[in-house]
Amino acid sequence: MQDLIAKAATLLEALPYIQKYSGATFVVKYGGSFMDSPDPTVRTSVARDIVFLEAVEINPVVVHGGGKAISRAMERAGLTPKFIQGQRLTDEATAAIVDEVLSRQINPEIVQTINQLGGLARGIPGPDVFQCRKLLVEDRQQPGRMLDIGYVGEVTRVDTAPILECLEQGITPVISPTARGEDGHIYNCNADIAAAQTAIALKARRLVFMSDVPGILRNPNDPDSVIPCLRVAEVEELKRTGVIDRGMIPKVDSAVAALRAGVEKVSFVDGRVPHAVLLEIFTDEGVGTILVP
Ligand SMILES: Nc1ncnc2c1ncn2[C@@H]1O[C@H](COP(=O)(O)OP(=O)(O)O)[C@@H](O)[C@H]1O
Ligand SMILES: CC(=O)N[C@@H](CCC(=O)OP(=O)(O)O)C(=O)O
């Protein structure tokens, strides 16, 4: 009996959040790193959370990555993955692999998993909603000199119409992080930045980054050093001292941009932890890190 009462208490803890967020749009970034887990229950557990959000009238919008899968496909094709300031050097051959892996492999897999669990999802290839300009990155060795890293784009516009059309029909859009360039070519975009731009364009209430770490760590080698609540003012110092590094840099930068543009809450959770999204959204304690103004 006590167990049953505890279950009711858990449901009741979720109630104010369900009431608060009913009808709201949440953008959930699926990181390529946790999706790569050899344990298939990780992917189903995350998809079940999306189905739960749909069921309580929250509109989830998924933007996914797939960096590790792209690197593997490149290696199979005899290409060596190379990153410059976290952005993949993307020549013509790499751009074709990126498009194939993100929009034709990972995207339909996520859609299928959500649908198999009783949800309603639809894949949207990034170029159908994202426009971009070519991204040039500054050479760290020679400040002021800009480097051409190929077909890498910076999202400049999000066409919200196809996304809103899905949401109006109770369908979860699942979007890949590629974009149409000014020259008509398909460009490769960092998925964190694409997710944040999507949240901004949709005026989403929340943006949740799911990755393969328990949150933002004070010591990147110590999983117990999660920073539960990170202030925007602390970010630059953590980047300068190398605490926030590599893949976490575009996440945190785009999180700050989203918060400044009006997204109420940005969280960083561990996609490997079962139901991390539900725990973050529907419990008083939350899990992982939240970024606050
Ligand atoms: N302070 C930090 N806290 C947590 N992770 C960090 C930190 N600094 C760097 N990282 C790295 O960021 C990675 C997550 O970014 P990324 O590899 O791009 O993941 P995803 O594919 O999920 O977007 C972590 O696996 C970790 O290696
Ligand atoms: C330009 C650029 O670097 N694009 C990324 C796109 C995928 C991505 O961002 O995947 P994660 O979220 O798994 O890191 C890449 O090619 O890896």
Image (tube, helix red, strand yellow):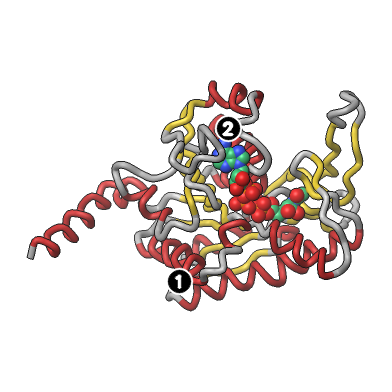
Categorize mark 2 by other alpha carbons within 10 Å: few (<14), some (14-19), many (20+): many
Which residue is painted at 65% across and 29% down in the image?
242
Q: Is mark 1 within 8 Å of ligand 2?
A: no
Q: Is residue 166 above or below residue 204?
A: below
What amino acid is found at the position of numbered circle 1 in the picture? Gly
Number of callouts: 2
- Does the rendering let one see residue 261? yes
The answer to whether 84 appears left or right of 69 in the picture is right
Which residue is painted at 23% across and 50% down in the image?
13
Q: Which residue is mark 1?
A: 119
Question: In this rendering, which labeled residue sits more in front, label 1 or label 2?
Answer: 2
The answer to whether 103 appears left or right of 26 in the picture is right
Q: Which residue is mark 2?
A: 256
Q: CA distance from mark 1 to mark 2?
A: 31 Å
- Residue furthest out toward the left: 1
Q: Is residue 82 above or below residue 234?
A: below
Residue 220 appears at what percent x and percent y? Answer: 56, 38
As rendered, which of 142 and 7 lies closer to the eye?
A: 142
As rendered, which of 97 and 103 lies closer to the eye?
A: 97
As rendered, which of 132 and 168 lies closer to the eye?
A: 132
Which residue is painted at 68% across and 49% down in the image?
158
